[in-house]
Amino acid sequence: MSMITIIGRGHSGTRAISHTLYTSNVYMGSLLNASGDLVPPESMYAACRILASHVEWKGDLSWDFSQLHTMPIPAEFENLISVYLKSVLADKSEHKGWKIPETTLAYPWIVRMFPEIKYVFWIRNPRDCILGQHITDDLTDFGIPYPQTDDVRLRRAISWKYQYDLVKATPKPANWLEVRFEDFVLNQEETLQKLEDFLGIKLARIIVRRDSIERWKLDDGVNYFDFFAPAMTEYGYEIPEREA
């Protein structure tokens, strides 16, 4: 029996892999929404807020996550995760898992609770990630402090950076794979082969649309911030040239 979860901020294209797993007969929970999220989400949201209370904000766009890796995990957090994952944990399917973007906010303790499961970190160009509204746009809704702003795009960008930093600060589990959404769209067969090798199962092919990527090119608002640069460089995304 194997268990899989998807890590990645909202609007990273994670519904594509959730739908792929579901179509491949991976049990993804008793109730899913249109995005392939396991619902209801309230227990996961509450667990995220408990974890956030142990993150130290250092000011500006810097957070100290070190306490999360050594402190005892609160029993309340574990109980909430058990409630959220009740249907998945109880199921006897050979392959099972779950997906909801807020798992990313709880990731440091999820990986300590479930060190042996398979983690897929789903990545998308942040310029596309911040185009649409998501429940994690305002981090204060999850108890996470950050420099307050009325700029919606900046707020989303800060949320993206926080979640990227949180994942990067967490020691990688034994079973870890990083996949770019753009590769899934443009090179589906090659990307699915990589996923099949990692997961040890045959995956279904779902319909993908070329226009689901690089939407930022048609956007007339601000969709790039300088603090995206390190991550974009790491994952091979083009960084805009500075205007003279």
Image: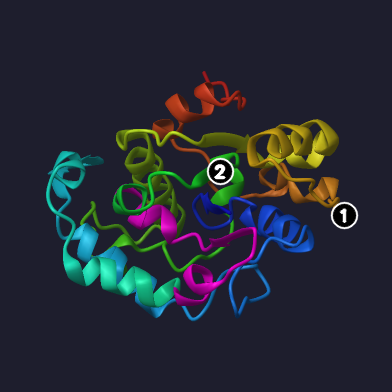
Image height check: is 17 above or below 173?
A: below
What residue is rendered at 71% in x and 41% in y? 214
Q: Does 113 lie within the magenta span?
A: no
Relative placement, left or right, of 4 versus 149 is right
Q: Is residue 200 left or right of residue 221?
A: right
Q: Amino acid at mark 2?
A: Val
Query: Neighbour class for label 1 at 10 Å: few (<14), some, many (≥20)?
Result: few
User: Residue at label 1?
Assistant: 207
Residue 45 higher or lower than 221, as above or below:
below
Identify which residue, 109 or 232, lies in the foreground.
109
Span of residues in magenta: 86-108
Residue 95, magenta (yes or no): yes
Residue 31, given in percent of the width and then of the height, sits at 60, 80
Decide if residue 170 is in sight here: yes
- What is the CA distance from the residue labelled 1 to the residue labelled 2? 20 Å
User: Closer to the camera, 134 or 197?
Assistant: 197
Name the image quarter holding residue 52. bottom left
Residue shown at the point (17%, 50%) measured from the top left = 55
Residue lying at 65% horizontally and 58% vertically, measured from the top left: 94
- Report how many numbered discs are placed on residues in the image: 2
Residue 155 appears at what percent x and percent y? 38, 55
What residue would you read off at disc 2? 120
In front: mark 1 or mark 2? 2
For label 2, the crowd category at 10 Å Cα-Cα, with few meaning under 14, some 14 to 19 and many 20 or more, is many
Give residue 28's position: percent from left, percent from top. Answer: 62, 67
Q: Quadrant of residue 149?
A: bottom left
Going by the numbered disc 1, the residue's amino acid type is Ile
Disc nearer the start of the sequence (1/2): 2
How far across and how far down the image is residue 242, in percent?
51, 22
